[in-house]
Amino acid sequence: MKALLIVDVQNDFCPGGALEVPNGDTIVPVINKLSKQFDVVIQTQDWHPQGHSSFASSHEEKQPFETTKMPYGEQVLWPDHCVQGSNGANFHPDLDTDRSQLIIRKGFRKDIDSYSAFFENDDATTTGLTGYLRERNIDTLYTVGLATDFCVKWSVIDGLKEGFNLYVVEDAVKGIDIEGSVGQAWSEMTEAGAQKITSQELLT
């Protein structure tokens, strides 16, 4: 059985948001068309408390996009974004969420960031998505959303590690692209076993 996984299509990752992905909103109509083709639709939502450890503002003399060492490894520091209850944390207003059956909130623990739909950044703390998918006999995920080079990439790689089949819909993802990170993300995903597909292939 297959499902559509919509990663972090939230206001703060769209144009005008605190951590905007260039043209991030342009994928919304494509995702809306795709969601009508799936019986199971799952969404993720970045959901940070105020003062989250991944925010540059939580570290003296650090700027957004610099890195710091955390107990679980190197962490990119971000502008404050997707703060719980804020408009920036809301899903994009044009995104059709009516068909979504599960929303996985991630990054809500103050001391650890979470890119992946499956695990937090320590690679040990689970979100519960694996168990949900197995209980529902879902073995294949078609992934869309933001951003290609962070939350989409890590969700896809972790999903493959968990034994699922992963497709990434090329025209329904967008990336931030820090020093070629989008190209690197595509290489990592395909080398790990993910398959590229277009929305047109799915819709015909």
Image (cartoon, helix red, strand yellow):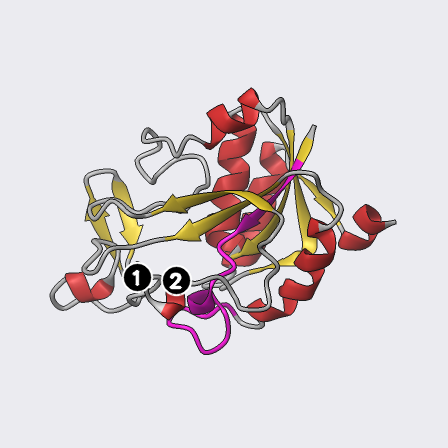
Residue 18 falls inside the magenta stretch: yes
Mark 2, residue position: 89
* Left or right: 50 as drawn, with respect to 149: left
Mark 1, residues whose alpha carbon is within 10 Å: few (<14), some, or many (≥20)?
many
Work out which residue is located at the far right of the displayed protein and give it. Answer: 204
Secondary structure of residue under mark 1 = loop
Where does the image place residue 181, in percent across and percent down from the top left? 50, 57
Q: Is residue 15 above or below residue 121?
A: below
Q: Dots 1 and 2: beta carbons under 8 Å? A: yes
Residue flagged by tag 2: what amino acid is it?
Answer: Ala
Mark 1 or mark 2: whose residue is earlier in sequence: 1
Place residue 200 in its image quadrant: bottom right
Q: Residue at x 43, y 63 (%)?
A: 90
Residue flagged by tag 1: what amino acid is it?
Answer: Val
**Residue segment shown in magenta:** 3-21
Residue in front for this viewpoint, 2 or 62 = 2
Where does the image place residue 185, in percent across and percent down from the top left? 54, 49
Q: Is residue 39 above or below residue 20?
A: above
Work out which residue is located at the far left of the displayed protein and give it. Answer: 60
Mark 1, residue position: 83
Residue 202 falls inside the magenta stretch: no
